Amino acid sequence: MAKNDYNVIVCIILAYMYKCLKDGKPVDVELMNPKTLGIPDNYWVYIVRHLAESNYIEGVACEYYKGG
């Protein structure tokens, strides 16, 4: 599988968030930012938005602006 494959990135994000939950630690968003994951910013936004809309994650506020 490619490093930037959607399912791989989703698995990395969810596994990290689950570990934080299980360990009772807050999620450090900097550890799962686009640069760390090696993906473009817009792809990261797409993934996080879809995870939130599918109720896999919560506490995410997605705002839409004209022009992106």
Image (spheres, rainbow, N blue to C red):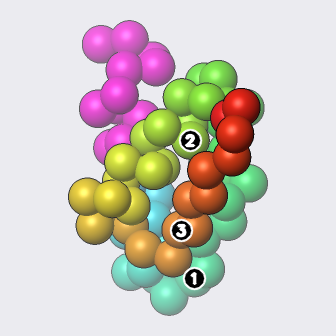
Kind of element beneath mark 1: loop
Pointer 1: residues within 10 angstroms few (<14), some, or many (20+)? few
Which is nearer the N-term, disc 2 or disc 1?
1
Spot occupied by residue 19 in the image (x, y as percentages of width and height): 42, 68
Q: Is residue 15 visible?
A: no
Residue annotated with mark 2: 45
Q: Quadrant of residue 61?
A: bottom right
Residue annotated with mark 1: 25
Magenta region: which residues?
Answer: 1-11
Residue annotated with mark 3: 60
Above or below 27: residue 15: above
Q: Nearer the viewer, mark 2 or mark 1?
A: 2
Kind of element beneath mark 3: loop
Residue drawn at (45%, 50%), measured in percent from left and top?
Answer: 49
Spot occupied by residue 63 in the image (x, y as percentages of width and height): 62, 58
Q: Is residue 4 magenta?
A: yes
Tag 1 near tag 3, CB within 8 Å: no
Q: Quadrant of residue 12?
A: top left
Which is nearer the N-term, disc 1 or disc 3?
1
Q: Amino acid at mark 2?
A: Val
Residue drawn at (54%, 29%), measured in percent from left and top?
Answer: 43
Q: Is residue 56 magenta?
A: no
The quarter of the picture where the N terminus appears is top left
